[in-house]
Amino acid sequence: MQVLVTGLSDSHLEVVVARYRESIAWTRNVPKNARVVIYDKGGDLCPRESARAELRRLENVGFEAHSYLHHIVTRYQTLAPVTVFCQGHPFDHARDLHKILRRLCAGTEGVDEFRWLGFIVDSDDPAGERLFVNWYKNRDKRRLELERFCMELLGESARAWSHFHVGAQFAINRELVWRQPKSFYERARAMALEFPDGAACFERVWDRVFGVVGVDPAILDGALCRYLKPVRCDADGSEKVRGRRVR
């Protein structure tokens, strides 16, 4: 069921921001009829930056996955009809986020259960050999334990390839969230804290967490990676989108 948020009150669309030490001045440009909640793990947020938002401070653990799941657990009964989950600086991977939010608020776009946000559709194998092992933040070249993660959380094996939008950002309607009991998300929140590289696992399977297939195979057309926006390469081979390096 597609949810269109026409005739919004302050609670019909909620933007949940998982912030560390990024500037969140951009939230001042979120449409006024959307509620903004910032989960701050940096502890250095200027009150003037967060004046537009409801601020919640959390311990710096579990990355964005923990923040998202904390919101779902603590607001399970009072979730907004549509919630957008995003990073403190969401634009590296979803540079058109403001446009999307305006369209959602205007009711010209909706959310058909689950919608990835971002312009890079990528794929990783259960051990993370293709992406995670070579990720610049994974300095010791750890392998990903996605198979064990999926079995413990979902009771299912990892797929040969997990297809996802890079950046761990998405929109979801609450009816889809409510298909799983609150206890499921409590267990997921615990895994965000305790499972090795849990946030990286969640990034690859958020759609499966909610029981849907988030990437239409037609988008990939047999490939493992697709850019939905123009990308150019720098002289050193790094990818940039309108002057910003894509990590």
Image (tube, rainbow, N blue to C red):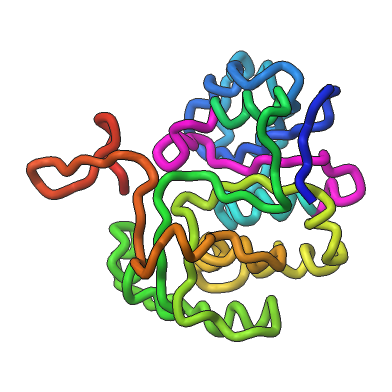
Q: Is residue 47 above or below residue 76?
A: above
Q: Is residue 38 above or below residue 51?
A: below
Q: Does residue 74 show up magenta in the picture?
A: yes
Q: Quadrant of residue 129?
A: bottom left
**Where is residue 110 drawn, in percent x and y?**
70, 38
Task: Choose between 162 and 200: the one closer to the eye.
Answer: 162
Task: Choose between 194 and 226: the one closer to the eye.
Answer: 226
Seen from this angle, which residue lies furthest right? 77
Residue 45 shows in the view: yes
Magenta span of residues: 73-98
Horizontal arrangement in the rendering, residue 166 relative to residue 50 (left or right)? left
Q: Does residue 37 show up magenta in the picture?
A: no
Task: Choose between 27 and 195: the one closer to the eye.
Answer: 27
Seen from this angle, which residue lies furthest top? 48
Q: Is residue 153 above or below residue 165?
A: below
Q: Quadrant of residue 244?
A: top left
